[in-house]
Amino acid sequence: MTSLAVENDPYILPTPGPNSPVVLSQWISSGNKHPNALYSASVWPLAPLIDNPSTSLVKISWKHCPAALLGQVKLPVWTMINGRLRPTYLQNQGVSARARTSAEDMRDTTYEWMRLARWLHERRISSLGNCTEDVWRAYISERWQDGVSRGHAEKICARLTDLWAFDQLGARPAGIARPPWEAEGVDDFLPAADGSAGGENSKEPLDPQVLGPLLVWAIRLVDDFADDILAAWTERQRMFTAAAANRASRESWAALEQLLLPRIRSGDGLPTVQSHGQRKFARTYVSALTGTSPNQIGRFIEQHQLATLAREQPGPCPLQVPVTGRIDGNPWRENMDFDEVAELMRHLGTAAAVICLYLTGMRPQEVQGLRSGCCPDPEPGADGTPGRHLIHSWHYKNVTDDDGNHISAGEEREVPWVAITPVVNAIRVLERMVPEGEFLLSSAHHDFTAQRSHLGVLKNGALNTRIRDFAAWANREAAAQGLTGQAIPEDPHGAIGTARFRRSLAWHIARRPGGLVALAIQYGHMRTVLDARTSSGYGSRSRTGIHSVLDVETALAAADTAAKLRDQVAAGEKISGPASRRALNAAATTLRFLGRIVPKTFAKKAAAFLARDGVVLFDNPDALLICAFKHDNALCEPGPGATAPRQYDCRPGCGNAVRTDTHARQLRERADEIDQLAAAAPGPNGRRLRANADRLRETAANHEATAQPAKAIA
């Protein structure tokens, strides 16, 4: 096959061997005497290509290319050195494109490809053939994060496209996917003119398997453990105050001996705390318990060599506060510990911040700018129904004065945010951690160990560190509590950072995943609020607010649904439902939007995509159907101007419903699962469950009786 390809296509080069020259002889001028190298060498000199005496003699060093991808990168580089790009390819690359470039440009292009190889290797991608469109999007977004000018970014995109082009010119192509900017236009993939990487859409949303347990532990700390932690912190602070005020007395010395001498003699654990990586005697704790002064504690430690014994006989420092928090009905701690409280307070603040970052739609700057009192309890309505909690926040992005000057201090947002219950609970906990009117994430009041007088609020770097530490603590706690299924795995797209939560909210609203993320109904209500876009825009002063992020995720989810339906009918599946013909037309005409990293300009395209009433498809894994959303047909009663259904309120008999054979199979599988539950349920509950299972089977049977192949419907 290789020989035929080489004979019939002059642009395809034969596969080099270990002893093949790096530069083939036809590209070396007769007067060039610079040494060549072999393909197997670790350094490739490009001097044989250089005849200009004023040009530096460049070379390619392979030491920074990961071994797993070395051979795969070397081949297209060798092809670039010795081959030519096709004229048909060059026609679409602009007037500056060349079939062959300079040696210096080849070196720079090679190092750009090596950089990609290192990024792939870090993500355990061991084949260039796995460089799919999705991977391209993720890489190019991260590539701009170090700060790249728009012009240089365009050149980088061209070099990466050349990797795809030269891969095809080798006798053994790796099968690299065509970069998406070649089909969609490079402008949408470039950073802003100032070199920034773009807006929220350029951030990879958090993986559901990561965000689910992270949110579970955050809500658990805020809702279930906060009272215990805050009470323990109050007691700890009281003990510090008491210890500092103690005066020496015979009674306090006697109390000290009564507490510690039996433990010293028996070898039982002594009260200790962790300090600078070592277990040390808990001076303050013991002083507060016994009423002893610092001098008395010091003398006792010296007399009984407690500094050494503390390391040999470490023990807890239980606090006399009740433990009310439960996990699966059991207390989460036997006692709250004096030494652990500061760490728990730190994690509690982080948990509350995670909830606010994720479940509001705010940018990190807005969450950091929230103050105590920002979310007052609402007045009841005229009919006595409770009103919505609103968060009054300050925003900072693009805030200017009348002359167009940037206002660093920001301004209060005209349209407040609507707070769902977990957010209200998180704010209430943070309000208990800081003084009235103070920033909820005040640096000074969240330094629980040293309690230094920091200015301002916790910055993104500090929050990112705390989130990482919180995840590590949650994993230790999950193991200790026997909840290994609630451990937080590593995110495949990198560290959990504050900038990723906003995009993640939109992603989960649009896709409503199951599993540990158990707020689907609340997500649905948030979509209703977001789709309202009241006044100048909910949570926004412009079209680039949270709704643009939501539009992007909804459009990507809808495109995925269309692609999946297209693949299913191509595989021979039948479909049923009143909207079958519309759904097939939509599936046939919807473009594939592969990947989750998208440029910020995609938001306009996404809004236009969703505005096509009647031809946008929404997957509903709870109802086991596809909604070909047409506003006037929808029984879920979407609000005026809504471009998506209320998926949490999907109703039987809707004219937008479509089902496939896969849905019918899933209906029967769910019915079987419900029957198993019914067998273990008491009489009335069991009957209701069996009736539900029967309805699911009836729905599956209706599909099977009415379903048709795509050709028959079209």
Image: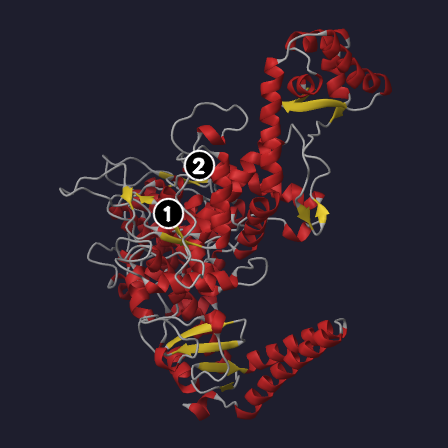
Classify residue 600 by image quadrant. bottom left
For the point 41% across and 72% down, the residue is 645
For the point 58% across and 36% down, the residue is 230
Q: Position of residue 372 (x, y in %)?
A: 42, 39
Classify the position of the C terminus by image quarter: bottom left
For label 2, the residue is 441
Q: Residues within 10 Å of mark 1 (few under 14, many from 20)?
A: many
Q: Is residue 587 left or right of residue 699?
A: left
Name the residue furthest right: 266
For label 1, the residue is 363
Does the image show residue 21? no
Name the residue furthest left: 403
Residue type pointed to by label 2: Leu
Residue 176: give its label: none
Q: Is residue 158 left or right of residue 324?
A: left
Is residue 595 placed above or below 492 in the rendered structure?
A: below
Q: Is residue 706 left or right of residue 224?
A: left
Q: 29 or 687, which lies in front?
A: 687
Q: Position of residue 509 (x, y in %)?
A: 45, 62
Q: 65 or 263, which lies in front?
A: 263
For the point 27% across and 44% down, the residue is 149
